[in-house]
Image: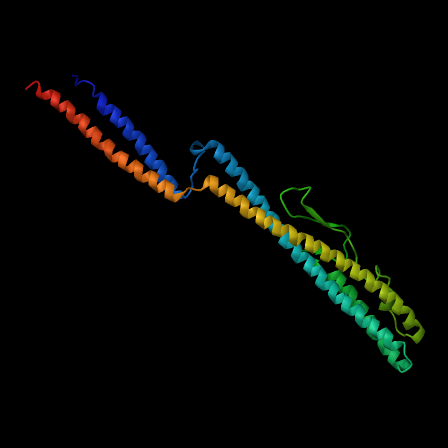
Amino acid sequence: MRINTNTASLNAQESASLTNKRMQSSLEKLSSGLRINKASDDASGLAIADKLRTQATSISQGIDNGNSAIALLQIADKSMAEQSNILDTVKGKLVQANTATTSSAGRNAIAADIAKLMTQFDNIANSTNYNGTKLLTGAASLDFQVGEDSTNNKITLTAFTSTTTKLSISGLKSITAITAASAATQQTTIDTAINTLNTNRGAVGSVQNQVESAVRNLSTQYTNVKAAESIIRDVDYAKESANFNKQNVISQAGAYAISQANAAQQNVLRLLQ
């Protein structure tokens, strides 16, 4: 029997130290809500979780981009809807001018109304913008990145211009008089402009549907990616609470073991009495 080195006590202290470290780690997880708080907790898991978090961030921004694009497209569509109302009104006035029951004075008044409406048509085209970007006088196409891939997740709105000049009806802006014959001719011109405007509106609506579909898909992806990250990164409270209680019991048992190992040394001293 030896008293110089209490091997049993040292072994018990080593075990107690390891148990305390496990308890501290368990408390850290319970307090943070994370299973992985540092790379040493799970190096490969941390790498995967961080990649998923980056993916989720990109997807979230893609959703924001998509919602902004939808707002932009809605502005363009509403403005063109008003332009369409103007053309409908002008078409009605031309029909009115092309009938024998309308006097010359009445046709002159119609001409003045049409000129004002055409001016408003261009005012709408020139003032419609989103964050400074002109929407109805576009010189270039608009690209919307709706997703994390800069190449494959782009949706493009082809450039178009919705002005009286582009629709070949600018002559109506300066009209001062109109006859039944000219009213009939202008009706055909207005019909062509209406068809072109409807085509442009259809293109905007098609792109909006595409963006909305992409946003819905991204929302599903975001949920799934965050769920996958949570499985890896977040702590299971029930499991970790059970683990903490286990380590706590072991710690108490370790403290008892240390006290017993030290007490055993005292028994050796009794041999000297």
The answer to whether residue 222 is left or right of residue 33 is: right
Q: Position of residue 144 (x, y in %)?
A: 68, 49
Q: Quadrant of the C terminus?
A: top left
What scheme was used to colour the molecule? rainbow
The answer to whether residue 38 is left or right of residue 203 is: left
- Give the vertical position of 95 relative to 58 (above or below): below
Q: Residue at x 34, y 36 (%)?
A: 24
The answer to whether residue 50 is left or right of residue 171 is: left
Q: Residue at x 20, y 21 (%)?
A: 6
The residue positioned farthest toward the left in the image shown: 273
Q: Quadrant of the N terminus?
A: top left
The residue closer to the viewer here, 41 or 121, is: 41
- Give the vertical position of 149 relative to 176 (above or below): above
The answer to whether residue 144 is left or right of residue 101 is: left
Q: Is residue 219 visible?
A: yes
- Give the vertical position of 266 relative to 160 (above or below): above
Q: Is residue 179 visible?
A: no
Q: Residue at x 22, y 23 (%)?
A: 8
The residue positioned farthest toward the right in the image shown: 181
In which quarter of the view is residue 259 placed? top left
Q: Position of residue 243 (x, y in %)?
A: 34, 38
Q: Residue at x 68, y 57 (%)?
A: 72
In which quarter of the view is residue 186 placed? bottom right
Q: Position of residue 80 (x, y in %)?
A: 75, 63
Q: Position of residue 12 (x, y in %)?
A: 25, 27
- Give the vertical position of 74 relative to 98 (above or below): above
